Amino acid sequence: MPYVIPLSYGYEMQDGTLTVYFHSAAEGKKIDILKNNKQVCFEMCCEGTPVFAKETPCNSGYYYSSVLGFGQVAFITSPQEKCDALNKIVLHQSGFSANITPEQASSVCVYKVTTTDYTGKRKPQPS
């Protein structure tokens, strides 16, 4: 059955290939599902600004940016690659660089989706 859960993520883009990194506890429903079926669909939505059209409420909505993609999960086991991925997540989520140690990385499960099957959509706010 489909299963959706919001996650913190970091990413990198190289030559048209998007790699999205995630982390979580090493056990639980999500990990059980991913171990049995590595195929995933992911969605990343940048925070938007609401638009309220008082005269025509059906024209209300959001200015936003989003990415939707498909791929397969790969679990990361190398301590250095786990640290690199976690550092990307911290940078994306907070805007500052971190120096995650192998000891810190050992306490979480880290995985990634590498894909060229993604699309973006944006409704920009007028200038």
Image: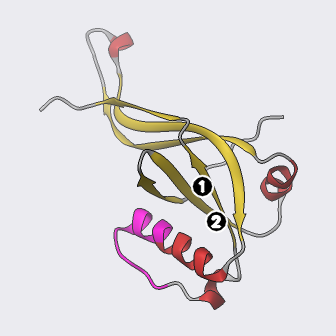
Residue at disc 1, secondary structure? loop
* Neighbourhood count class around disc 2 (C-alpha, 10 Å): few under 14, some 14–19, many 20 upward: many
Q: Where in the figure is residue 7, as x and y percent of width and height?
A: 60, 55
Which span is picked out in magenta?
88-99
Q: Label 1: few (<14), some or many (≥20) within 10 Å?
A: few
Q: Judge by depth and name the residue closer to the eye, 47 or 57.
A: 47
Cβ–Cβ under 8 Å for marks 1 and 2: yes
**Residue beneath disc 2:** 23
- Quarter of the image with the N terminus is top right
Say which quadrant the C terminus sits in: top left
In the picture, measured across the screen, residue 75 lies left or right of residue 98, that is right
Q: Distance between the residues labelled 1 and 2?
A: 8 Å
How many circles with numbers are drawn on the protein?
2
Mark found first going from the N terminus, 1 or 2 = 1
Question: Which residue is painted at 70% across and 52% down in the image?
Answer: 73
Asked if residue 98 lies left or right of residue 53, the reply is right
Q: In this view, does 81 lie above or below 106?
A: above
